[in-house]
Each structure stands twice: as structure tokens, then as C-alpha cells.
Image (tube, grey):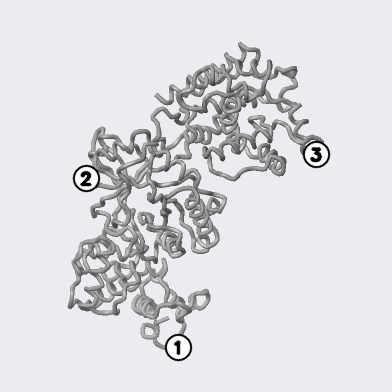
Amino acid sequence: MGVSSALPGSGIEPKVFKGLLNMDPYVLISGGNPSIRQIQQWLNGRYIKRRDFQIIPAEGYHSRTVAQCMLFAIQYEAGMADGVANGVFGPGTQSSLKSHVLQVGSTGIWAQLFTAAMILNKRSVAFGSFTAEVSTAVSAFQTFAKLPTTGKADFATWSSLLVSYGDQSRAGSACDGVTKITDARAKALYAAGYRYVGRYLYNPSTKNLLEKQIQPGELATIASNGLRCFPIYQTFNNSVDYFTPAQNAEDATFWAKKFGFKDGTIIYFSVDYDALDGEVTSNVLPYFRAINNALLSSSGYKVGIYGARNVCQRVFDEGLSSTSFVCDMSSGFSGNLGYPLPTNWAFDQIDTVSVGTGDSLIEIDKNISSGRDIGQNTYNQTSVSSKLDVFFNEKLYKDALLKDLQKYLVSIGVPETGGDGWTDRDWATLDGVTTTMAFNRILSKDILITNLARELGIRKALIQAPVLWESRKWNPTDIAADDAVIVGAKSESSTGWGQIFASSAISGWNYCVSKKIINGNLFDPVKDLRTVWFKLKDDIDFNIKCTAYLHFWDANDIGVPRPSLSMKPADIQALIGRYNGVGPKAEVYSKEVKGVYDVLENYNTLCRG
């Protein structure tokens, strides 16, 4: 343990006894660094008698425990009393470090602490005095971390060695944020010294951070003000359960292409939680292998990673990332404490700050840039149109839209509940769907439907209208039809929220894949029929996606232009009718559901405005 000099004699002190009872090792273990073990023993021996210092392992590995004990050591040497020293990198600790600038020739306890911090950050120096060799190593570290290259143990260097975010007062040339970069904000950022802006390719929320996703025209604004953009992809990747090979890069690559990012662009896939080392092995690495396979097969983009130091380094060591965007601001993450800055870091996130005033005011995360990634400032001409649909504003329009839908449906003989021969009294017991229930269904999937419509370049009402209608018109006979398929009495039936036949879904899917409208593998119309039917029945998201894809196949089938943002009303009505089939019933269907489309589109237009 290294405490024999501090605790002479044969007695066993309580802290020593505690060490014997736990599983901490006190011998150099496989892969351990002898210099780190020497530091661990030195810390134990010097500070064992301080109230809040507990004996740490002495096995040769850096860890969050060692990192915190280094802060305790700094505070003890700064003269903080027991109960005041707390292992936190606060104002008192920072003030003490500012008064202990070291250079060649410095000796004593502060030189020991500094060289220990260097060794813990994987810098090859001798533990002890501040020699010329130490100064050379310090200069190399400062260059690597983009600190002023002084060769001295100044405050900025102390800070970067002791805590992940380092000196938060230092200037950053990169930033990221969830707010749209307007012309005024771009000018304010440039004036403040920023040159690189991280923006998100995707926004999974309809209620929060509505400008998180890159907005139409925003990239042009960024570029025209001398800024460059690097794209970030994040959905709900904030827990271990998200990270499976089934999560792929299709959305990320689609949106990157849609926004016009060129081949060679690095997309930063987020690991936005404190991933433990075992979770990196079991979940994160397989996820990034799948991401790499997807990008290699569908685009010329490169894979970057956003995450804690350990996650970033391990993904890079496996050859699964080009560069790292390090979330060093999360200094308490176990993946940051005790780990050095990744060798391939491109952006180092260190603080949240506000820039500008009035119309130019914007809150950003300040990042240090290494120069390994300079983002993009020119884009392909396939950028997202400003006419694309946006998320529905429930606060402003939910009640009004529901009333207008109810009014229209009543006018064509579809009451709030019942209809089609099913009495109002029996509707609830027969599991019928009311107008309000069908309306709430499409709102509950507004994230999916909006992003799907934007990806495909169509109006979201073209997806909403048939799903709402089919949900509202669903009745217990549909249960019987589904049950017949389940037991094998029928080959298929229309099923799910969109009431789609598996054969139709396969036609729509295969058509879109073959025309490169979407990425994916083709289905076999015979062998995959039953698999697709059950997926339509049980997977709501898949059902809704197939509703959209089917429109493209239907348009080709009936000879109307491919669905787009500028479809003629007659073509929209024809397409809606074909969704139901052909013949007189489909003609009636086209008129009735086109009315639903028009009501929905009125409010979608308001949201776009």
C-alpha cells in the first residue's frame, strides 16, 4: 500500500483494515505501469492520515479514484483543512494552482505532484523534479492539447492534466449547439473567434429543442459568414440499450446527403451517456461496426464519435472512427476520469457559454479544435428545401385541428364514434377507434411522420391522411381477418394502423429500394410474405413507413408524377384513391380521404409558416 513509513509498527489501522476487506489490489498487476504504482503508493503514504483520504489501489492503473485523490493532494498542499478539502476542482484549488507555476529547476512537493499528473496522462517523464526532460514533455503535451506552448507548468497545463475540461476560460474556435444559426448569430460567433460549428442532422423530439436539427437555409448562412459546419447525429443514444447493431446509419447518411454534405465529411455519432468499459465492449463497439458497414456501403462519409475519453479512444483503437468529439465538459463521467485525451481528438467540449446580445444572442457549447477536422463550407446542390414540413405545434393548433377534422368527418357521415353499422353503444366494447383516438395516433407519431416526409420530399399529410382514416374506420371485422391470417386460414389481410396488405407493402418497399429512394434489401414476394405481414401488424413504425413507400409504387402504377412537394391536387386525389385499390369504391375513398388530407395540410402549412 505504501504506508509502512506513515504507519510504523505492527498495528492495523482502520483504513488499512478497510483496504484488506475490499477487492483492491496492492501489487502490480498485468498491464500495470510501475511509475503509476509508485505514485499510488506515494499518495497513500503521504496522505493516509488526512481525514477524507482513503487508501487507493496500488496496482499501476490510473482511475477515477486516483484522479480524485490527486485533487485532494493538491488541496492538502494548498493548506486546506480536513472538511474543507473535498476533491473538487473549485475556485480555491484553481487559485492555488495559479500561484504554483513550475519551470526547469523546480523541485519539492509541487514538482512531484505535477510530474505525477503527467505520468497519469501517459506522458513519459520521471517522477520528481521539473527537469529539462520534463519541460520538453510538457511542450509536447501542450502542443497536443492545443495549449500555449510554454514548457512550463502553468495553470492551463495543470488544469488539462487534472480535470477533463481543463481551463474553461481559454478561447475556443469551435462550438456546437441546438439553436439555429441566423445571420446575426453567425456574425456574433465569428467576431468571438469561432470558426467551426457543430449542428445536428436529426431531431427526434417534437416538443423540445425544435431548432436542434439543421434548419432550411442555415448551412448557407453559416458558410456566408466565414464559418464551417461539422455534422452530429444523435437520436436517443443516451443509454446502453440503444447501442445495438440494429441501429444503423441510414437516417444519418440520408440527412447528410439531403443537406448537401460532400463525400469525406465526418459524421459524429453520439454516445451521450457515461458508458462503462464493459458496455463499450458489449454494445458500443458492435454498434460502431454496424455504422461503419452501413456508411461504407451507402456513402462516402467517414465515421466520427462523440463521447467520453475512454469510449472515443476504444472505438478509434478498433479502427471504427476517424476522429473524436470529446464530451470533456462531463468531467464526472467514469469514461473521462482517469483517461487521457484521445489521440485522434478533433473537438474538445469544455464549457457552455453565451455569445452575442439581442438578436445575436446564442447559447453554445465551447469547443477546442485540434485541426483534425475543419468541417465543411461548401455543399452539394441537394440541400433541404425550406418548403419541407416541420413538427406539429400542438400548443397552438392541436385543439383547432381536431375540431376541424371532426367537423369534416361528420359532414361525410363519420361521427366521433361508431358508424359503418357499428352502434355507438357497442363501439367501445368492440374495441372501435374514435376520431379523437385516430387523431392522437398520428400526433403520437409526428416525429416519425415528419422526418419520413422530409426524407422522402413529400407532404406529411400524404402519410397522415390514410393512417388517420384507416385507423378511424377500423372495426372488429379486421380482428377476425387478422386472426384468420395468424392461424393460417388466410394468406394475408390488410393490417396495422395503415391497413396494408403485405403484398402491397412488399411492392412499395421493393420499388423504393430499386429506385434508390430508400436503402435496404429487397423482399421476396412469396418467401417473405408472412414475415412482412406480421411486421406490418406488430411494428407501427414499419407500417407507417410502408404507407409512405406505397405511394411511390402507386404513382408509378397509375402513371402520375412521383410524389413531391409540388403535386397537383388531382394527382394527390388519384394517389390516395389508388391506396385503397381501383374501381368505384376507390373513387369514393379518394374524395373522402382527400378531404382529410386538405384539413391536415392546412395546419401543416401553418406550422411551416
Residue type at mark 3: give it: Gly
Above or below for 265 versus 1: above
Q: Could you tell me residue 288's position as x and y percent?
A: 49, 56
Mark 3: few/some/many CA within 10 Å (<14, 14-19, 20+): few
Q: Could you tell me residue 356's position as x and y percent?
A: 24, 39
The residue to which callout 2 is attached is 192
Q: Quadrant of the C terminus?
A: top left
Q: How many marks?
A: 3
| SS state under label 3 | loop
Q: Residue at x 72, y 28 (%)?
A: 431
Q: Could you tell me residue 543's position as x and y percent?
A: 62, 35
Q: Of label 2 and label 1, which has the lower sequence position?
A: 1
Q: Residue at x 53, y 58 (%)?
A: 286
The residue to which callout 3 is attached is 488
Q: Residue at x 68, y 37 (%)?
A: 537
Q: Quadrant of the N terminus?
A: bottom left
Q: Residue at x 64, y 18 (%)?
A: 589
Furthest residue toward front: 559
Mark 2: few/some/many CA within 10 Å (<14, 14-19, 20+): some
Question: Distance of mark 3 from mark 1, alpha carbons?
Answer: 80 Å
Above or below for 53 versus 345: below
- Is residue 107 toward the left or the right of residue 379 in the image? left
The quarter of the displayed image where residue 370 is located: bottom left
Q: Of label 2 and label 3, which has the lower sequence position?
A: 2
Q: Nearer the viewer, mark 2 or mark 3?
A: 3
On residue 10, the disc is: 1
| Label 3 close to label 1 by CB (< 8 Å) | no
Instruction: Say if residue 375 shows up in the picture.
Output: yes
